Amino acid sequence: MLKQIRRALLLSLALVAPVMADTFVFTAIPDNDETRLRERFQSVADYLSEQLDVDVRYVPVKSYAAAVSAFRNNQVQLAWFGGLSGVQARQLVPGSEAIAQGKEDTQFITYFIAHKSTGLEHSDTLPKAIKGMTFTFGSKGSTSGRLMPEYYIRQTFGEAPEDVFSRVGFSGNHSRTIRLVESGTYQVGAVNYAVWNSELDAGKIDTDAVKVIWETPSYQDYQWTIRGDVNERFGEGFKEKVKQALLNMDDPELLKKFPRSAFIPASNSDYDSIRETAKQIGIID
């Protein structure tokens, strides 16, 4: 009897294993509110499933670090990373590659925003009057919400953010950064310009309460990164098929959800400057 049960279980596993192996799983850093992320990436999953002729599943994560961990542990084979999280993930998974980026991601920008009570206006340089105010970054692992703004804060003041501001926080995502500065919980914050512009277009920002006071110089940011072992699991040429599917994504409604006008080729070397900046301020070794 036990042998029959064991044989049945082995047969069941044999039947299930190919189905599980055929599921291509991806995730994305949680840089926006969860509802918007699910809407965006479920649409991507449907598109990729049709293009690749395999089952494709999007799995949400709670943090940037969780996205990197899922990629490292092969729980996901593809991820929509920011510049810094992509560098971290590829460092942990030899052979992984950045394969596509948004057209806008070659010239990405961080906005410094301020509550009306500060009296700060838009400036061509980072206003030194922010010294002593309260300040919030986005996620600790964010390129646009932490890495690049910290770099320019250090460059301007010659000090770490903790020594520049009276209080420093990490909101967790860009939408929350906007809300925290808009409400006056923090006087100043750093936010992804694409999220700001998207929420502005949607009428979700009270521009009487919060405004952009400075824009950083441009830098490389978001990209799709894929594990190097996907061909072994999904068949020869699969990595190239994924890359081409991303580059061929031209549905205006789908692109608008990112928001990006198109996806273009990317390579690991595109993010060398991000790696060096992260090393300079001690975020990575």
Image: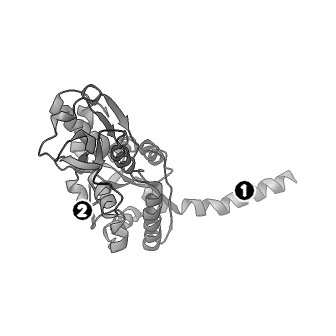
Taking the image as shown, residue 168 lies to the left or right of residue 160, namely right
At x 28%, y 52%, the residue is 208
Q: Secondary structure at mark 2?
A: helix
Label 2 neighbour load within 10 Å: few <14, some 14-19, many 20+:
some
- Which amino acid, by three-letter code, is at mark 1? Leu
Residue 237's x, y, as percent?
Answer: 39, 65
At x 38%, y 61%, the residue is 239
Label 1 neighbour load within 10 Å: few <14, some 14-19, many 20+:
few
| Residue 269 is at least partly visible in this image | no
At x 30%, y 59%, the residue is 200
* Res. 181 image quadrant: top left
- Which amino acid, by three-letter code, is at mark 2? Lys
Please identify the quadrant where the N terminus is shown: bottom right
Give the residue furthest to the left. Answer: 124
| Residue 133 is at least partly visible in this image | yes
Closer-to-camera residue (6/213): 213
Residue 137's x, y, as percent?
Answer: 33, 40
The numbered disc on residue 10 is 1
Please identify the quadrant where the C terminus is shown: top left
Residue at the spot of label 2: 103
At x 26%, y 53%, the residue is 193
